[in-house]
Amino acid sequence: MIFMHSIRKIPEKAWYLSASFNCVFIVLLMSIGSMLVSIDSEAADSPQYLYDNEALTVRSLDNHAQIIDTKTGEVIADHVLGTRRLDDEVLVYTGDNRDTPYTAKKGVLSSDGQWILAPEYDGIDLRRDSGAFIVEREGKHGVFGLDGKQRTPIEYDRLPDLFSSNDQWIAKREGKAGVINPHSGDVIVPTEYDDIELWEGLALASTFEPDRDHGRTTVYDSDGSIVANLDQVSDVRIWREPKLLVVNQRVLDPFSGEDISLSGRYDEINPIYGSDAAIVKLGDKMGLIGADGSERIAPTYALIYPLNEDKQAEIYLRVAPDTWPDGGNGKVGVADTDGHEIVSAEWDGLDLITVKRWEGDPTRHFFYVRKNQHFGSIDTNGDTILPANFDSARRLSNSGQIYRVTRDNKTGMCSLLSGECPVEPSFDSVNVFEDSYRQMLFEVTKNGRHGLITQSGETLIPVEAGAIRKVSTDVKAASIRAAVVDDKGLHGKMLEYNENTTQWHLSPVELSTEDALRGGAYDGQFNAHHDQPIITARYLPADYLNAEAIVSGVRDGDLRQLVYPSLQLSSDDKAYAFFNTFKGMDQPLNGALPVCPTEDGFDILLISPRYASANCALFDSDKRLHFTRESDDSLHCEACAAKGIPTEWTKRGSEPEVPDHCETAFEDSPGIDQLYKDWRQRFSSNVSDLKKAFEENNNRIDDADFSRIMRASIDMETRAPHNVARGLMKSAGHLDSPVAPDLETLLATFAQAEPAGYGGLFPETQSQYQKKCQQVWYLRLPELEDAIANGDDRPAGLNYALPNDGTFERGVYPYALFAKSGDHLRLTGISRDLAVAMQWIKETGHDASRADTPTSVREDVPSSP
């Protein structure tokens, strides 16, 4: 029997050779950063997505395709695995059924079926602004023109450097750098330098001395000629704004060759970035000059240095006329780059504060000043905003530059930008209660009582409550549910924000005692919420085992906070405690405290900081709290009484109960493989669209577009959007965190993972997520399976024992969280166990995609369950 393969004209939309190939194909193309820079952000198209013309046709075979000449039937390209449209050209991937897009050979085909570059390269990158292709073969790179003619040998380790221009490319070879012209292929600077800086068509090529403290620099123009005899000079600095060079303390115009006559006048000349001024030094004195050599401040000052260097803003200089301020008791002031005094030099300390509250808001500045250990502010005209008569001033929020100020041991709030003090110093403490809206809310205390005030000073809740706690925030409804305890007991309050009037309003709400305390993961313990530890045991004081008892404790003044005052022990030998909530406790012991096991229980070390590496043997008894385990698994702490801490502690479950409305949501997970496969395809497609929109909008994307693009695969009201958003920033190079997972890593991990089992419903600790009824799905990772087969019984530090169906356990098997939306799944969170596995794969050199896909993971995932 003869099988006739289908022959079709090239359609507008992409199609894929197979569903399984498509998913891996997308992931791999997004992860080949060094090979194909130009296609990082988008999935490759299928072989059929070429042009809607009569010249080319695609013949679909079993596991690959052919591109044929429509008129003659001649096979132009065989064994085609995929293509990528490059304006009027097509990038073609060829190989056998064992190849992936990473290992496939690449070529470039014109619209009329002519090979511009034969399919024989490991990588091809189009740089249209430079009129060139970069090709890669066996780890080396070279340049071809858009007509396919070779311009340079294929011999460079890297092309181009990140800081290259369209006309000058920094080329790296065997650890040395040079410059080539990508249009002609000419060598401008030979590849024999340690470092090269391109500026205004010039190349500053430097060779470092053996001690690395000094270098010698040669300056080349765009034709490769040495500029003004600047060959192997020891000190070259760029003066950007007037386009000058400072060479061995003389100023040179490199374009005209003119030497501005400053030679020998100063010991140092240091240009100020973004300015036509430079700071000069003569002996131990400093001054200021202009680009024409004129003195703006004679070199008589003890200190001059920029408070900011920004060509988009006014530049201010901190000046000390007589004596250095640090250690010399010198007085400081402010001058501008014209040499004019703005703030007289009468202050002990002075800092520039930059204010930009949101995108589009004009940038403003003021000076934070100190004199005789008192603080205030001055505007950029030198006028007083707030007199320096506060004992301290610490910023609470960038919005409006609200500062917590103290005077005579009383605390208030002032804006150091406007000079307004909506809350005069009259309280014992002022703390931020809510800052998600234009007008903030602050919790204030006086004589052990609590109240709530707005940023404008309006009192919402009088300072009469025993405690106030935020239960939940509804950003869409612009409202906050709060629990308030006063002498009469517990009350609920609804705080509503009106965007039109920018005012807060107060109304009562129904609120149970249990709801009042169910407001945070890990009982709301801040350090535990940040660290996301695995809690192995949780204890409550015997007198505070339920919500009613805690409310009574707050009402009677025995507890300072409306929280479960729990003691939580973690798998990494830390104790997360709420000790400071007890009235008698006067030592700061909230946090992650080291735990030292003993024969009859454990000791908690009373040390700080909380990340200190503690050797238990080095600490005496006065630095310990000893807890004895009783026969009923309760704890007794004799030494706690002297610290104001309860002595009797009862064990309680470390996991909260699953809410009732979720109990019957899913009893099992039928069709788990297909549900996961469908989700993975949506997620990959959404991420591709997200990256494309992000790049097309100059590496920016607002919340509305993010939600619109991603909501088909992730639940926008859970932890997942935070993880994906950080991954997007990491992929774009805007997140400087070497262990943060980028989108390629997440895609590669999910693409290789297979559902291994259903862990039931996640016992969510945070009330805002509890309505989601999140499912625990254990994921099998090939890299961990390989490690097990090779004898590692604890890969990634996990026990790696798949729990029974419907059973949830931490620390044993990687898992992710999903919620059901109709017949589809949406991602709600990435577990810490999965994050740990991803980090382990990276550190041990395993290959998450089995095609050299880079992997990474963030260790401090604040939104991981």
Image (tube, rainbow, N blue to C red):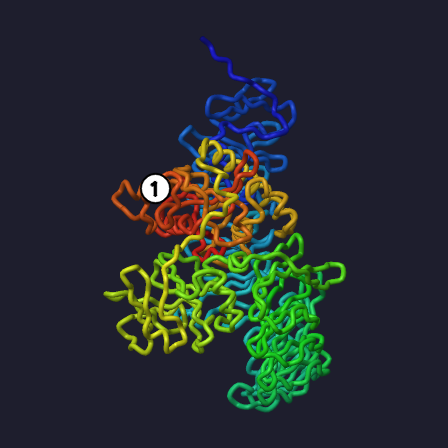
Three-letter amino acid code of the residue under disc 1:
Leu
Query: Quick check: 856 above or below 825?
Result: below
Query: Quick check: 458 above or below 773?
Result: below
**Residue 612 found in image quarter:** bottom left
Give the residue at mark 1.
802
**Residue at 61% from the left image edge and 22% from the top image edge:** 9
Residue 695 horizontal side relative to residue 29, left or right? right
**Residue 128 found in image quarter:** top right
Q: Give the quadrant of the N terminus.
A: top left
In the rendered image, residue 553, in percent from the top left (x then y), is placed at 49, 69
Residue 570 horizontal side relative to residue 33, left or right? left
**Residue at 64% from the left image edge and 51% from the top image edge:** 702
Nearer to us in this view, 93 or 798: 798
Instruction: Look at the numbered disc 1 and give the secondary structure of its residue.
Output: loop
In the rendered image, residue 693, in percent from the top left (x then y), is placed at 63, 45
**Residue at 51% from the left image edge and 61% from the top image edge:** 196
Residue 385 horizontal side relative to residue 487, left or right? right
Residue 343 horizontal side relative to residue 523, left or right? right
Among all residues in the image, which is located at the extreme left? 599
Nearer to us in this view, 577 or 461: 461
Crowd tier of the residue under label 1, counting other residues whose Cα lies within 10 Å: few below 14, some 14–19, many 20 or above: some
Nearer to us in this view, 293 or 323: 323
In the rendered image, residue 369, in percent from the top left (x then y), is placed at 63, 82
**Residue 595 found in image quarter:** bottom left
**Residue 674 in sight here:** yes
**Residue 274 in sight here:** no
Query: Quick check: 102 above or below 54?
Result: below
In the rendered image, residue 639, in percent from the top left (x then y), is placed at 33, 75
Query: Quick check: 198 above or below 273?
Result: above
Among all residues in the image, which is located at the extreme top? 1
